[in-house]
Structure formats: C-alpha cells, structure tokens
C-alpha cells in the first residue's frame, strides 16, 4: 500500500498499543499512521502527545533536541519551538487536550471523521476501555463498599463508547484489550463478556458484521465462516510471546465479515521466556530512600546490613559471609549517564526494541523512600527469592517482620510482599505500583527496594527513550495500565499481513 493504514486509538493511556502498531514496517515507510488518539487523564495525555511528536520525524530518527529534553537539558517549550510543525501535528493527533469518551463525544467523533476523511481505504481501531470495574482487585474493593451499585457504575459500559465508533465508522479491523477479570464479571447478574462479544459482532441492526478472533488459540469450530471459542480462549499470556512479565490479558481481534481470512495466520508465534534479571541487570544499582528518618547512605546501610545478615541466617541456618557487602549509595536520578552492557540472554529482537545507544544513559531511574520496617521486610523477601527461588507468604515471615495491622491474619494479605524472581518473567505490573512497592520488590537483596519507573517500563517493554510525563506516581500508573508495546508490535504485524493479503 502506498499510503500508511490509518489508526484510531481510543482509551490510549500513554500509548502502549499505538507504539507497537507504529513500529510495524520499514523505517522509511511505516505500515501504520495513528491519526487520532483519545485519552482523558492529563499526565497520560502529555506522554501520548510527546510520543506522537516523535513519530513525526522521518526514518524513526529522533532529533537531538528530544534527547536534550528527556535528559532535562531543555524544557518542553524549547522542544516544541524547535519543531513547531511536528509539535502541531502531535497536538492534532491527540486533540490538543485530554478528552473523555462519553463526555466529549461531539469533539471526538468530529475529529475521527475528519481524520478518516471519505477514503474507502482500510483502517484500524485499537484501544482498551478502562478496566477497574472488571479487575478482580477493583471488584473486591467494590464488594466491601455497601453503597456500590454495579448497575450504575458507568465503567462497566464504557465499551459501548468503543462500540459506537465501530458502528458509526466501520473499521476494517479492531483490536480491543482488557483485563482477564472481564471474563467473570457479572454486573447485571449475567456474564458481561458474552454481552460484549454479541455487541461487537453486530454493532448495529442491519449494519456491518464482525467476526471475533483469538490471537492465542485456534477456534474450537468454524460454523458458516464464524469462529467459535470458549471465553478463556481470548486470554493472551504475555510471557509466552517474549514479554518479561506474566501479564494475562483478554485481547479481541475483530475483523469485518467481508474480509477474507486464513485463520492460521492470526495466531501469535510463541517466543522464549525472558527473565527479570536479564532485562534489569544492565541498569545502575540503587538504594532506596528512608521514610520518617534521616535519609542518608550511611543510615540506609545501617538498616540493610543487619537485615541481610538476619535474613541469610534465618533462611539458611548459617551466618552470613563476613565479607563486606557492596551496597549501592545512589538513589538514581531523572537521567543517569550510563553505558549499559546488556545481558546476552535478551533475544536480539527485544534488545533492539528496547535499547537506544544515542540516549547515552538511563531516564526515570530513581527510587522511592520506604519505612525502616518495610526495608527490613524487602531484604528478607528478596533474600528468600535469591536463596529459595520463591517469594514467601506473609505467614512465612518472622514474627518481628509482620506488619502491625489488625487484619494481618484475615487471609487478605497472603502474598502482600512479593519479590520479582530474577530467573523468571515478572508478575503483572499493575497500576497499584503507584501506591506502594510491596508486590514489586527488586530481586537483588543488596538493593532492597521497589522497582523504579524505568525498571517497570523495561518489564513492560517500553523503549528506553520513552519518557513518561507527570509526577512519579502518575508515571507508575501509566506504566501499570499500559499494553506492552513489544506485544502490540507482534499484533500489529498480524494485522498488517491480514490487510496486505486482502488489498487489491
């Protein structure tokens, strides 16, 4: 195709899906072009706009001013002034401000209509309606709220905004992502996933029909060209596709029924599993800060040394080595000049996806502060991971490390403190990482801390030059809510091949 295939990205977040699709095709002529991106959260919208700006440069080559910006050498105004045309194009793609589907539909629909024009060329809709109402954690919180009503929670039905775009503009293909909890959610007493599938297959009465395909499982049967699946067949386990994270999400591939398909070409190809350590061991070692005490390297070491010594003796039954510990002293920075030596265990495709030699360092790699009691727990839990190859349950912690909480034995905190095991893909990076690091403890006992924004972004497969705007809490939230871009690129390649085989 001479012209790139247009993409509209709804509920875009910081742009994980869009980043993956935008990577498809040669640098000189990308297969896809995002023409409209919608996001309502202000910090994520800033991130989205900045990344849209980077896509305006030929051959996917970032200008030197972008690197100056992410290193903190110039501000955003200077960056925008250096490239006013490219900045204006990015602003146009993201509507110039945060917008919310459901509240700002008039503006959003008009922008999509203008971006698509009157062309009959194929185009693609991507995005994932917000998942808090479907997630198991969100449903547990709602259950404890006696005034909560599932029927009146509009978040259960935001997919209808996505559906309205399908019905009105009839994309050739759509890709819709959500949490696995959507499969068991019953806000109206019946499974909402079945209702969503039915609506997506027939967005309007008498209008276009769509077939919904799994990207991970062949159909159980095909009846009259309609694929049949079980609900759980739509789950994609990211660790099977080269993502260094056990992120299990429901992803639907919707294809207009007039498009001919070879179903065998729609399945993602499995890749070797990638470990946490292979992704993070090239990054500078850091210490955390200390909450409610004087934060200094000496004070931190005075907490960590005995904590590691105790953990080693308690776990192994033997005293720790008398050799001095090589503990880090830095808490990191927004930019650290650093020449990484990447692990040979990272597959070459993923390594090329992540690294950027021009960056000459690491961005957004700085630590939080933790209470002394949490630092002691982190040391113990990470040492368990190193020595036993597993993260201990809270019932397995020594008595003096148990949190002083009245509900500690309620069963709700079974795996409250969780280390990311070095030799395995990480557990799911969720938006909860913005609140605390208890479930995202670094595998290295000598660092005894939670993951940084950049480490979480690495495990989500965001390129190292991908800057997250906003404060650190907002950055964590964006990373946790995103679709892994490297997975999205694999899906994008499937979509590109499908459209190419149908283009005449």
Image (spheres, rainbow, N blue to C red):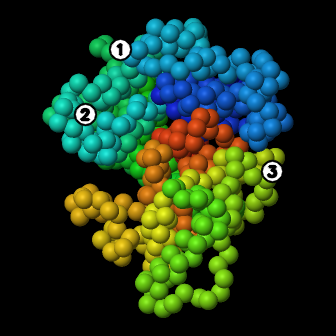
Dot placed on the residue nearer the N-terminal end, 1 or 3: 1
Would you name the residue on which mark 3 appears? 360
Between label 2 and label 3, give the one nearer the viewer: 3
Position of the C terminus, as image quadrant, is: top right
Would you name the residue on which mark 1 appears? 207
Question: Disc number at residue 478?
Answer: none
Question: What is the x, y in percent for residue 25?
Answer: 68, 37
Quarter of the image holding residue 46?
top right
Position of the N terminus, as image quadrant, is: top right
The residue shown at (39%, 38%) is 178
Nearer to the camera, 207 or 298: 298
Q: Is residue 434 visible?
A: yes
Look at the picture and state if 208 lies above or below 192: above
Quarter of the image holding residue 76?
top right
Q: Is residue 183 visible?
A: no
Q: CA distance from mark 2 to mark 1?
A: 22 Å
Using a 10 Å C-alpha cutoff, classify the residue at mark 2 as few (fewer than 14 neighbours), some (14 to 19) or many (20 or more). Answer: some
Would you name the residue on which mark 2 appears? 192
Dot placed on the residue nearer the N-terminal end, 2 or 1: 2
Quarter of the image holding residue 340?
bottom right
Give the SS element for disc 1: loop
């Amino acid at each position: 195709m001479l012209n790139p295939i247009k993409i509209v990205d709804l509920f875009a977040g910081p742009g994980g899906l869009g980043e993956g699709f935008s990577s498809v095709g040669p640098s000189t002529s990308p297969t896809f072009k995002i023409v409209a991106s919608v996001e309502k959260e202000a910090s994520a919208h800033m991130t989205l706009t900045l990344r849209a700006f980077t896509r305006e440069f030929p051959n996917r080559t970032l200008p030197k001013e972008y690197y100056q910006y992410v290193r903190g050498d110039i501000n955003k105004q200077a960056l925008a002034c250096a490239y006013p045309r490219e900045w204006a194009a990015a602003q146009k793609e993201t509507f110039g401000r945060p917008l919310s589907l459901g509240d700002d539909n008039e503006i959003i629909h008009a922008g999509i209509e203008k971006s698509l024009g009157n062309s009959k060329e194929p185009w693609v809709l991507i995005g994932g309606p917000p998942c808090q109402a479907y997630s198991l954690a969100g449903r547990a919180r709602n259950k404890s709220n006696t005034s909560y009503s599932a029927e009146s929670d509009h978040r259960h039905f935001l997919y209808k905004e996505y559906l309205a775009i399908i019905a009105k503009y009839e994309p050739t293909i759509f890709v819709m992502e959500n949490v696995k909890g959507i499969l068991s959610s019953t806000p109206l007493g019946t499974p909402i996933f079945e209702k969503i599938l039915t609506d997506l297959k027939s967005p309007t009465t008498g209008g276009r029909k769509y077939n919904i395909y799994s990207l991970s499982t062949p159909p159980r049967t095909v009846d009259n060209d309609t694929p049949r699946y079980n609900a759980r067949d739509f789950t994609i386990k990211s660790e099977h596709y080269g993502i260094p994270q056990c992120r299990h999400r429901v992803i639907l591939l919707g294809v207009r029924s007039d498009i001919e398909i070879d179903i065998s070409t729609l399945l993602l190809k499995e890749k070797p599993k990638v470990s946490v350590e292979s992704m993070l061991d090239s990054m500078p070692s850091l210490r955390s800060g200390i909450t409610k005490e004087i934060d200094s390297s000496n004070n931190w070491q005075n907490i960590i040394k005995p904590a590691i010594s105790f953990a080693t003796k308690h776990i192994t039954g033997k005293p720790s080595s008398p050799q001095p510990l090589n503990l880090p002293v830095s808490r990191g920075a927004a930019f650290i000049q650093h020449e990484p030596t990447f692990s040979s265990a990272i597959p070459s495709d993923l390594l090329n996806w992540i690294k950027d030699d021009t960056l000459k360092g690491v961005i957004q790699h700085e630590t939080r502060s933790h209470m002394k009691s949490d630092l002691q727990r982190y040391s113990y839990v990470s040492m368990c991971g190193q020595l036993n190859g597993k993260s201990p349950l809270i019932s397995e912690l020594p008595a003096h490390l148990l949190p002083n909480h009245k509900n500690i034995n309620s069963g709700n905190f079974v795996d409250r403190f969780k280390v990311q095991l070095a030799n395995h893909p990480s557990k799911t990076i969720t938006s909860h990482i913005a609140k605390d690091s208890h479930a995202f403890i670094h595998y290295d006992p000598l660092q005894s801390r939670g993951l940084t924004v950049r480490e979480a972004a690495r495990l989500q497969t965001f390129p190292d030059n991908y800057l997250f705007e906003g404060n650190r809490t907002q950055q964590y939230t964006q990373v946790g809510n995103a679709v892994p871009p490297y997975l999205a690129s694999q899906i994008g390649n499937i979509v590109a091949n499908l459209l190419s085989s149908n283009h005449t």
